[in-house]
Amino acid sequence: MTFTLNRRQALMAMGATSAAAALGMPALAATNRNLAVLNLASHAPSFIAYERGYFKDAGLDIELKFFEAAQPMAVAIASGDAEFGVTAMSGGLISLAQKDAVKVVGGALTEEKGIVGAVILASNKAYEAGLTDPSKLSGKTFGITTTGSSFHFMAHKIAVANKIKLANIQLKPLQKLGALVSALSTNQIDAWAIQANVANKMIREGAAKKIGLVSDYAPDYQVTTGFTSTKNAKNDRALTESFIQAYSRAIDDYNAAFVDKTADDATRDALAKLVYKYVEADSPFEVAKQNLIEGAMRVNKGMAISLKSCNEQLEWFKAEGMVKDSITNEQLFDTSYVKTI
């Protein structure tokens, strides 16, 4: 099986327009900015906001900058290579927040009971050898991008729920999503957990077997957050608010079309075509659309953030020695922009 990431790193920039005033958003000077993204369906609101001109309406001249893991995205924000990011909280992001370089300003993707969410997969070889349930992960290898990634935290939650010591699951950091897909497909790792659009593609092509859902072990898990530089959060409130408002418009579109299914078929198809440019573009459109629908996960309205889940993650990072105990919520979060849930 092949899994090709669709790299679109040189997309046409969009200038500010007078529509910002009509939408009640502050008009900003047109300055080229990057939004850090991954080629995953969880980033669908990023693609929708870009393609539908919501950033442009908000006075933001934004390009999409593609990455293959969460941790480098945080580094890009801190270095100024990207202005905003929407991805999982990683150890690197938390450490950069303690250095006053980045701030989490909102929430995005969340695990919700009753919605498929991330799927736990076993390689064909491991499944045939008896790995048919997450309770049997002891002694097996589990793929992650990096230490302290969302995949690492998922493994922790699965292990705790099944009374398995995480030390008894061999974690394999492979850095990139494509490398994880390849490793599972070729039986180099025994298990992995990934969003359903990727999982369904692998299952459909006979490259892996489904053995569980992350939502069974981590309900209400705030999988991804929105973040920016501390400089933006503290000193450029108009910029940060404009981004959140534009992104929130796209979230509403996404949830209506794919999660709540209140949008009509024509609207859903149109949005699916926008996302298809960036996600699973190597599959036939109808197949990719179905994967997008079947694998849709809730994205928090208005980028509201679950502080309970985020604090649980922060405490886990501390307990595992991946970040310093001294980091405070105030260093990591700026909760003045969105609702907390």
Image (cartoon, rainbow, N blue to C red):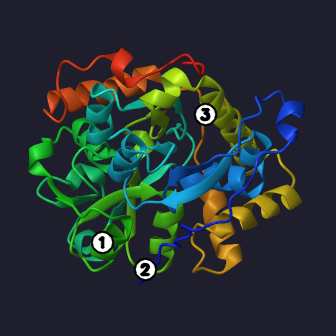
Neighbourhood count class around disc 3 (C-alpha, 10 Å): few under 14, some 14–19, many 20 upward: many
Residue type at mark 1: give it. Answer: Leu
Q: Return the disc, 1 or 3, that comes first in the chain's sequence.
A: 1
Q: Which residue is drawn at 60% across and 41% down?
A: 298
Give the alpha-carbon distance from disc 2 to disc 3, as whole Å. Answer: 33 Å
Neighbourhood count class around disc 2 (C-alpha, 10 Å): few under 14, some 14–19, many 20 upward: few
Residue type at mark 2: give it. Answer: Gly
Q: Against 227, is 177 above or below?
A: below
Q: Viewer-proximal residue, 125 or 258?
A: 258
Residue 306 can be seen, yes or no: yes
Neighbourhood count class around disc 1 (C-alpha, 10 Å): few under 14, some 14–19, many 20 upward: many
Quarter holding residue 161: top left
Q: Return the disc, 2 or 1, that comes first in the chain's sequence.
A: 1
- Location of mark 3 (residue): 300
Q: Which residue is drawn at 19% across and 18% down?
A: 326
- Image quadrant containing the N terminus: bottom left
Give the alpha-carbon distance from disc 1 to disc 3, as whole Å. Answer: 30 Å
Q: Where is residue 256 in the image (x, y as percent from the top left)?
A: 76, 44
Image marks 2 and 1: residues in contact by CB distance under 8 Å: no
